[in-house]
């Protein structure tokens, strides 16, 4: 459908194309009917939703997506894989069936931050890649715990026994 024909319709509502790149597979959903775009099929009958795409003053973005979970496949992925920092991209598109790139705009690129709700539908909170992560890393490193070796000749009392440290 051409842009002119799309705009001539009484209601022009965009659809969102959601791409989630889990470690084990890539999921592609459309918030409306199944469409073809970028040589890929985007499933639309599943009922995926996009909400709260916001851009903050510091340039970071947040969003929330809801994915259908009728077969419990999405919850199995979320519960069995490390989903934090898995890439997610969202595009806004106009049209039905096969969509041309002229009518598609990327509105979000980031990573999964958390999964606050898992049930018949799985909610995923999203953040811009490396925006919040740089302030609160996923992996925390502490100081070495065994960085002090007592000198030779030190006496250690342990459970009624006495040990004297010797050189090797």
Image: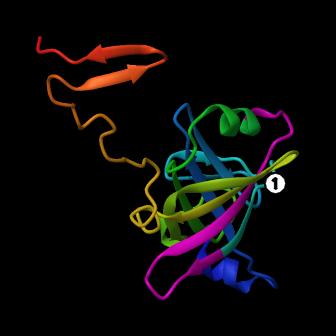
Residue in view at x 68 percent, y 77 percent: 6
Residue 17 visible to the viewer: yes
**Closer to the camera in the image, 13 or 155:** 155
Q: Which residue lies furthest to the bottom in this view?
A: 57
Image check: 74 left or right of 134? right
Image check: 147 left or right of 8? left
Residue in view at x 36 percent, y 47 percent: 142
**Closer to the camera in the image, 139 or 15:** 139
Question: Quick check: is 129 in the magenta stretch?
Answer: no
Residue 111 position, x and y percent, is: 51, 56
Residue 113 position, x and y percent, is: 58, 57
Quarter holding the N terminus?
bottom right
**Closer to the camera in the image, 41 or 145:** 145
Find disc 1 in the rendering and name its residue: 47
Residue in view at x 21 percent, y 18 percent: 165
- Which type of secondary structure does the marked residue at label 1 adopt? loop
Label 1: how many residues lie within 10 Å, few (<14), some (14-19) or many (20+)?
some
**Looking at the image, how many numbered discs can be counted on the residues?**
1
Quarter holding the C terminus?
top left
Residue 58 position, x and y percent, is: 44, 84
Task: Give the magenta range.
Answer: 53-73
Residue 45 visible to the viewer: no
**Closer to the camera in the image, 14 or 85:** 85
Picture quadrant where residue 15 is located: bottom right
Judge whether 71 appears above or below 141 on screen: above
Residue in view at x 75 percent, y 33 percent: 73
């Amino acid at each position: 459908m051409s842009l002119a024909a799309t705009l001539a319709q009484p209601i022009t509502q965009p659809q969102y194309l959601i791409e989630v790149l889990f470690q084990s597979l890539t999921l592609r959903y459309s918030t409306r009917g199944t469409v073809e775009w970028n040589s890929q099929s985007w499933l639309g009958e599943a009922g995926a939703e996009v909400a709260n795409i916001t851009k903050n003053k510091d340039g970071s973005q947040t969003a929330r997506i809801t994915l259908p979970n009728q077969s419990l496949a999405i919850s199995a992925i979320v519960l069995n894989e490390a989903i934090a920092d898995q890439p997610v991209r969202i595009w806004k598109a106009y049209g039905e069936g096969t969509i041309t790139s002229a009518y598609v705009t990327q509105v979000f690129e980031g990573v999964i931050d958390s999964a606050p709700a898992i049930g018949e539908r799985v909610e995923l909170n999203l953040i811009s890649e490396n925006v919040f992560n740089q302030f609160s890393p996923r992996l925390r490193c502490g100081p070495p715990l065994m960085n002090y070796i007592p000198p030779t000749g030190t006496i250690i009392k342990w459970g009624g026994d006495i040990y004297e440290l010797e050189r090797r």
